[in-house]
Amino acid sequence: MLPVRYRRRVVDRELTERLGAVGAVVIEGPKACGKTATARQVAASEVLLDVDAEARRAAELDPSLILAGPTPRLIDEWQIEPHVWDHVRRAVDDRVAPGQFVLTGSAMPPDDVTRHSGAGRLARLRMRPMSLFESGSGSGEVSVARMLDAEPQSAADPGLTVADVTVELATGGWPGFRGLTTTQGLSAVRDYLGEIQRVDIGRVDDRRRDPDRVARLVRSLARNVATHAAATTLAADTGGAGGPLKDDTVREYLTALERLMIVEDLPAWSPQMRSRTALRSAPKRHFVDPSLAVAALDSTPERLLGDLKTLGFLFESLVVRDLRVHAQASGASVHQFRDASGLEVDAIVAARDGRWAAFEVKLGQRQIDEAAATLLRFAEKVDTDTVGPAATLGVIVATGYGYLRPDGVAVMPVGALGP
């Protein structure tokens, strides 16, 4: 069997840079997003705690045993033996050299496990499933970094149809599922989600949870993807023979899903505004990859193309995933905006130095004018004396070319987005 060729990831450069500056880098992300393959590109030796029983026994007896080896040393799925954390921290202190360890983790351990700070010793790096550019389905011609620099950009048509984009969001950016047929990819994501609901959500904190209740919540999240649905709304939407889930149960399950990095809500952006209109702080509901919502709904690309309202929400979630992947390379984060007057902006990319760009997400070309008007109205309401003007206002669509409108709003197809 030929070895699987590694496909370059946006975080590769960030990983190399951080390893040159600190003793250890912790790569965090949902399982199967490619953490191990990425870490192996820089590692000189490795120990795989999820499959190596001997290594797990050694870690239980004396964690320092699994730290020995050429550096950088990869410790894969470190959270399986969480006391390894303190020993890595101590080893970094003792060795006084950068680039000693790369740790990967598919679940965030309880806060008390990492209570001994890794500040100055360990850097955290977030990974997500692949963007369209990373998977080879997109051109990457429109750079998020250049948008934050206010550079006008154009792009050729990446060649994706709405049907193509629907298949992409339904099968997801999971590296191990690339190359499968659409039917196989849909089945793989359903199996992945089923394993999380049956097994992983209990392992994350050693608490038994009813898989049926978890599945009901996940379906509710899928029905409310890209909305501001509160936990109480999700609870009421769960239904089932036993009645809706309790609000506290929903919040507990959501926390577990967040620790597995399966759910990644989009936080609100709260800039200084010219008016006194109250800003809404509720996050928008998103999975780390829209394919999980499709799997929870037990849907298919064909069915989604017949339900354009649902497809529109899922498309927005796809765009958020890709913006997050590419914004991270610029030290930026992604948010959303909503105020009490009903003004909403789907995505705000905000850099640490104060630069920002705002985007509306629309599945169809006919909605571009409306989206551009929303962005211009939003830009007028922001207090630019305090937060500065938008570097870019853009409408992200499913298909077509990338260009700049006469009103200054950029239009770009999702397949052209890149770092």
Image: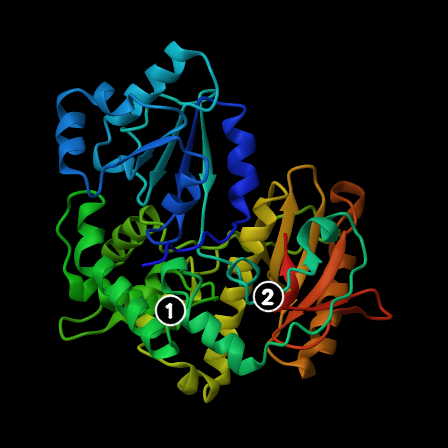
Which percent across, then down, holds residue 76? 30, 38
| Image quadrant where residue 157 sits | bottom right
> Residue 27: which quarter of the image?
top left
Going by the numbered disc 2, the residue's amino acid type is Gly
- Identify which amino acid the numbered label 1 is placed on: Ala
Residue 54, position as x, y percentages in the image: 14, 33
Measured as percent of width and height from the top left, residue 236 is found at 29, 69
The disc label shown at residue 138, or none: 2
- Up-down relation of residue 133 to residue 57 (above or below): below
Q: Would residue 343 be seen by someone viewing this image from the given angle?
A: no
Q: Is residue 253 visible?
A: yes
Q: Which residue is mark 1?
A: 293
Instruction: Examine the rendered structure and indicate whether residue 372 appears above or below residue 163.
Output: above
Q: Nearer the viewer, residue 405 or 12?
A: 12
Nearest to N terminus: mark 2 or mark 1: 2
Rendered location of residue 20, percent (x, y)? 54, 25
